[in-house]
Image (cartoon, rainbow, N blue to C red):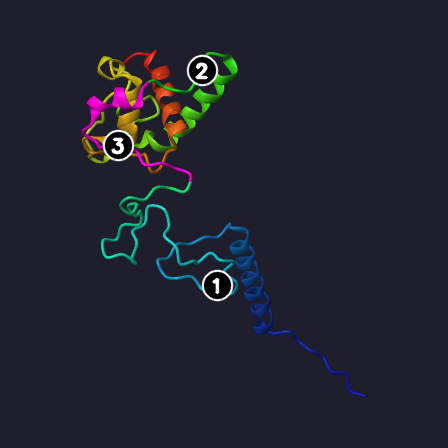
């Protein structure tokens, strides 16, 4: 009986090499070792809700004609757990009489630590892009062409009452928009306390 011999030619080994290369490529992509960037919409078998109809941060909206993703509150409306701020931007002279003193008590170490920590948290979330983390008006927006906002640690700002600072946070000043619809009243007062704490460091 004649014995048949099977020889493995070049094509067989080429398939093995291609298969190993393809397997390595797939493992690299899945592990994140191999990446690439594209402006095209990715092909997703299971998208896990990655591609949603929503506005993403720092991206303009294509739904509205003005392309603004952040919408202004409707006139005469307030948040469910909020209240309407009673003053307009120019009403600085009414701030002391209508708003009064800072209601948050920081006389004990526990209250002081909590309120200043909360004020620092809210300040860094909302105020640092313009005023920077040190409060001296050299935030990230300045490097992009915006004018320097006031230095929160100088004598001019120190001389303002707590009610005046609360009013600026709430209603805005000059080109600064108000944050009454974004920051709760107690958090605004916490920011005032935190600014006072920064002012102790003086201007550097």
Residue found at the far right of this picture: 1
Q: Which one is in front, 169 or 9?
A: 169
- Is 37 above or below relative to 116? below
Estimate the spatial distance between the alpha carbons at disc 1 and disc 3, rounded to whole Å: 45 Å
Q: Contact (CB < 8 A) between labels 1 and 3?
A: no
Looking at the image, can residue 136 be seen?
no
Specify the label residue 44 is tagged with: 1
| Front in this rendered view, residue 157 or 188 | 188
Position of residue 38 measured from the top left corner of the image (x, y, whole percent): 37, 57
Quote the CA–CA distance across marks 2 and 3. 25 Å
Q: At 32% across and 34% down in the image, what residue appears?
A: 180
Q: Residue at x 42, y 20 (%)?
A: 104
Point out residue 75 in the picture as x, y percentages from the top left corner.
26, 45
| Quarter of the figure with the C terminus | top left
Numbered label attached to residue 106? 2
Against 79, residue 17 (above or below) is below
Q: Earlier in the sequence, mark 2 or mark 3?
A: 2
Label 1 neighbour load within 10 Å: few <14, some 14-19, many 20+: few
Whether residue 107 sits left or right of residue 8 in the image: it is: left
Q: Please, what secondary structure does the residue beneath circle 3 have?
A: helix
- Residues at marks 2 and 3 touching, judged by CB atoms closer than 8 Å: no
Element at label 2:
loop
Q: Is residue 116 magenta?
A: no
Q: Is residue 159 left or right of residue 115?
A: left
Using the image, tell me which numbered label, if any, was put on residue 171. 3
Nearer the observer: mark 1 or 3; the answer is: 3
């Amino acid at each position: 009986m004649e014995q048949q011999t099977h020889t493995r030619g070049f094509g067989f080994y080429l398939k093995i090499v291609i298969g190993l290369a393809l397997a390595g490529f797939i493992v690299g992509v899945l592990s994140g070792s191999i990446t690439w960037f594209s402006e095209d919409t990715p092909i997703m078998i299971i998208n896990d809700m990655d591609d949603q109809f929503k506005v993403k941060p720092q991206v303009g909206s294509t739904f509205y004609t003005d392309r603004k993703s952040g919408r202004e509150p409707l006139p005469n409306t307030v948040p469910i757990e909020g209240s309407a701020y009673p003053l307009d931007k120019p009403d600085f002279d009414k701030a002391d009489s209508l708003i009064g003193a800072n209601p948050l008590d920081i006389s004990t170490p526990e209250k002081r630590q909590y309120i200043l920590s909360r004020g620092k948290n809210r300040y860094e979330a909302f105020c640092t892009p313009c005023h920077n983390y040190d409060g001296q008006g050299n935030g990230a927006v300045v490097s992009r062409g915006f004018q320097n906002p006031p230095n929160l640690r100088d004598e001019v700002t120190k001389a303002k009452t707590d009610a005046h600072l609360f009013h600026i946070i709430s209603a805005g000043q000059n080109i600064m928009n108000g944050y009454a619809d974004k920051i709760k009243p107690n958090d605004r007062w916490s920011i005032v306390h935190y600014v006072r704490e920064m002012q102790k460091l003086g201007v550097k």
